[in-house]
Image (cartoon, rainbow, N blue to C red):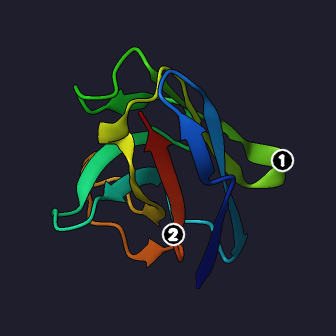
Amino acid sequence: QVQLVESGGGLVQAGGSLRLSCAASGRTFGTYLTGWFRQAPGKEREFVAAIRWSGGNTYYADSVKGRFTISRDNARNTVYLQMNSLNPEDTAVYYCAAGPDRGWFGPYGYWGQGTQVTVSS
């Protein structure tokens, strides 16, 4: 069983930056991918970025490519999402997820509680 805890959300102005953290604990072996998803009010949950724990390969949604960077610290079982050039469209609850290496979009069996990111104009 894997537990995921997100942190680092908050309120920022357009053009600003924010770094989210996802700390994993428990029996993490077998969870080869960690992904970030977001869900805006009244919208469906969408994929943001993902990373492979072993090789560090990354994949990004087109909407955040060039602005967001996903990384991991294997020793600390922590995944980060560095968000730059934020705009109001990035406002959402951001979720960290972990699962097997079956594809960048999932399935992800473990989810964090989410952290709110609000970008003002």
Q: Is residue 90 visible?
A: yes
Q: Which residue is mark 1?
A: 75
Residue 4 location, quadrant = bottom right
Q: Is residue 112 above or below residue 104?
A: below
Q: Amino acid at mark 2?
A: Gly
Residue 18 point in image, percent of width and height: 63, 36
Residue 84: mark: none
Residue 5 point in image, percent of width and height: 66, 70
- Report the side of 30 relative to 38 (left or right): right
- Mark 1: few, some, or many residues within 10 Å (few <14, many ≥20)? few
Element under label 1? helix
Residue 60 point in image, percent of width and height: 33, 30
Q: Amino acid at mark 1?
A: Ala
Q: Nearer the viewer, mark 2 or mark 1?
A: 2
Residue 22 point in image, percent of width and height: 64, 57
Q: Is residue 85 above or below residue 3?
A: above
Q: Quadrant of the N terminus?
A: bottom right
Judge by depth and name the residue closer to the eye, 50 or 8. 8
Residue 114: mark: 2
Judge by depth and name the residue closer to the eye, 114 or 117. 117
Q: Is residue 81 above or below residue 92?
A: above
Judge by depth and name the residue closer to the eye, 13 or 66. 13
Marks 2 and 1 close (CB-CB < 8 Å):
no
